[in-house]
Amino acid sequence: MKSLRDIKIGGTARVVKIHGEGAIRRRIMDMGITRGVEVKIIKAAPLGDPLEVTVRGYELSLRKSDAAMIEVE
C-alpha cells in the first residue's frame, strides 16, 4: 500500500481509499479528500510535518499521520 505520506514534493496521486474510522475518516472526507480525487503535494514544513497539498483547487495542510491513512496510486 502506498500512502499520500510517501509521495514526493511536487508529485501527484489519485486517492484509492481512506483508512481509519469514525471522526478522523469523516474529517478527512469533509476536507474534500475522497476516493478518485487527485492530490498534489506542494511542500512540507521544515521538520516534515505538516504537508501542504492541493485538492479540488484549494490548498490544504495535512498532518503526516492523517496522510498515512490515505491510500493512493
Image (spheres, grey):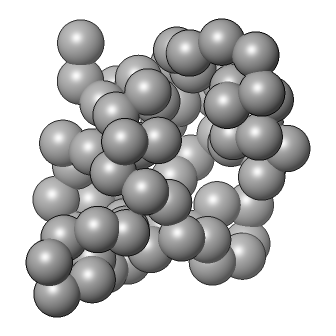
Residue drawn 77% across the image and 40% down it: 27
Pick whichever, 22 or 38, lies toward us. Answer: 22
Query: Residue 8: image x %, image y %?
Result: 16, 59
- Asked if residue 16 can be seen in this view, the reply is yes
Residue drawn 73% across the image and 72% down it: 57
Looking at the image, residue 1 lies above or below residue 71? above
Judge left or right: residue 15 versus residue 41. Answer: right
> Where the N terminus falls, by quadrant?
top left
Q: Examine the image and state in which quarter residue 42 appears.
A: bottom left
Judge left or right: residue 14 versus residue 44. Answer: right
Q: Examine the image and state in which quarter residue 37 appears.
A: top right
Query: Residue 33: image x %, image y %?
Result: 68, 42
Looking at the image, residue 54 lies above or below residue 38? below
Query: Residue 73: image x %, image y %?
Result: 34, 26
Residue furthest out toward the bottom: 46
Judge left or right: residue 19 versus residue 43. Answer: right
Residue drawn 43% across the image and 57% down it: 63
Residue furthest out toward the right: 30
- Asked if residue 13 can be seen in this view, the reply is no
Query: Residue 51: image x %, image y %?
Result: 37, 68
